[in-house]
Amino acid sequence: MSSRTCAKPSCNVSASATLTYDYGGQAVYLEHLNPEAHPMRYDLCADHADALRVPRGWVLRDERADAHAIAS
């Protein structure tokens, strides 16, 4: 279990995934929780990571379970 919690406001569930944006490439990456926190990444609980939606035209790359890229 992580000592870090989900970055979503008012969610106090332990984080299990790390969210990273690539603004230039219009991509969002979800990965297993990185070992260390970083100010340019966001930690999410499993529920919020699973429910994540990206802007139209962007790509979500969920690398937590070798998922295929999902275009939005």
Image (cartoon, helix red, strand yellow):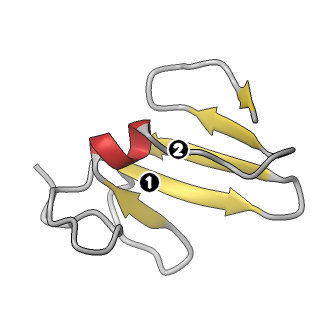
The residue wearing badge 2 is: 30
**Is disc 2 placed on a helix, strand or loop?**
strand
Residue positioned 70% across, 27% down in the render? 70
What residue occupies the far bottom of the structure in this picture?
39
Left or right for 69, reference 38:
right
Tell me which amino acid carries mark 2. Leu
Label 2 CA crowd tier, 10 Å (few <14, some 14–19, many 20+): many
Left or right for 23, reference 52:
right
Asked if the residue at tag 1 contacts the one at tag 2, i.e. Cβ–Cβ closer than 8 Å, the answer is yes
Q: CA distance from mark 2 to mark 1?
A: 6 Å
Disc number for residue 18: 1
Left or right for 19, reference 44:
right
**Is disc 1 placed on a helix, strand or loop?**
strand
Left or right for 42, reference 55:
left
Answer above or below: position of 63 versus 21: above
Residue positioned 44% across, 54% down in the render? 18
Which badge, 2 or 1, is on the more N-terminal residue? 1
Q: Quadrant of residue 61?
A: top right
Residue positioned 12% across, 65% down in the render? 3
Tell me which amino acid carries mark 1. Thr
Label 1 CA crowd tier, 10 Å (few <14, some 14–19, many 20+): many
